[in-house]
Amino acid sequence: MKDSEYRDDASPGAKYEAKQLFQQAYQAQLAENFEEAIELYKRSIETYPTAEAHTFLGWVYSFQNRYDEAIEECLEAIRVDETLGNPYNDIGSYLLAKGDAYSSVRWFKRALFAPRYESYAFPHFNLGRIYETRRKYLEAARHYGKALEQQPGFTEAASGLHRMQALLN
């Protein structure tokens, strides 16, 4: 977790405590103890808000199909730090889960332009899925291919690219 520029007045102790709470929340999330994870992420945010904590809280909400709350947390993450790519991709994913593929495209594209993102493979893959369902196979293949460039072992992207190549040949 990187420190946010959101609150410059926070003490190093508050930042450390928030980071510890975030790590505990993540462990609870991995153990699928979602209610505990939610409480710990909220405590982390109260101590020192970061885009990561808001994004991960949204992620836990999504596991409970609470997509509107997940989207709200991602929007808050963007308000805290607009450079983090994860919340843009996540909003697109939640909109997609809600059946709104049209609106999700702009969020996936915004994720691609975020300067701080560990894996641009995900928004490329998600765009590939959308273009495939719209039967824009060349565009889908391009995004599946870019996902594979970013993450060579991404098997779902490789499968998508092979499907598109078969359709285009």
Image: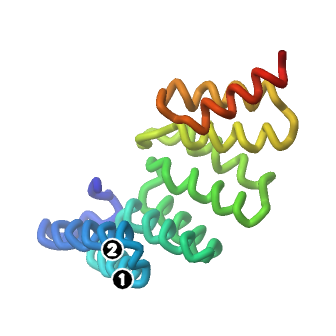
Position of residue 160 measured from the top left corner of the image (x, y, whole percent)? 69, 33
Residue sitting at the far left: 13
**Badge 2 local density, few (<14 within 10 Å), some, or many (20+)?**
some
Position of residue 63 measured from the top left corner of the image (x, y, whole percent)? 54, 71
Position of residue 158 measured from the top left corner of the image (x, y, whole percent)? 61, 30
Picture quadrant of residue 65: bottom right
Residue kind at label 1, given as amino acid type: Glu
Instruction: Work out whether mark 1 precedes mark 2 in sequence or the reverse, and give the earlier one.
Output: 2
Q: Quick check: 146 above or below 22? A: above
Out of 48 and 55, give the one closest to the viewer: 55
Q: Measure the alpha-carbon separation of dots 1 and 2.
A: 6 Å
Horizontal placement of 53 versus 10: left or right?
right
Q: Could you say whether the residue bearing mark 1 is in a helix, strand or loop?
A: helix
Question: Residue sitting at 49 percent across and 52 percent down?
Answer: 86
Horizontal placement of 124 versus 55: left or right?
right
Q: Quick check: 147 above or below 127? A: above
Quadrant position of the C terminus in the picture:
top right
Q: Are marks 1 and 2 in contact (CB under 8 Å)?
A: yes
Horizontal placement of 34 versus 120: left or right?
left
Q: How many marks?
A: 2
Q: Which residue is mark 2?
A: 28
Q: Which mark is residue 99?
A: none
Q: Which residue is mark 1?
A: 36
Residue sitting at the far right: 135
Picture quadrant of residue 162: top right
Picture quadrant of residue 20: bottom left
Question: Residue sitting at 55 percent across and 35 percent down?
Answer: 155
Position of residue 85 measured from the top left corner of the image (x, y, whole percent)? 49, 47
Out of 49 and 70, give the one closest to the viewer: 70
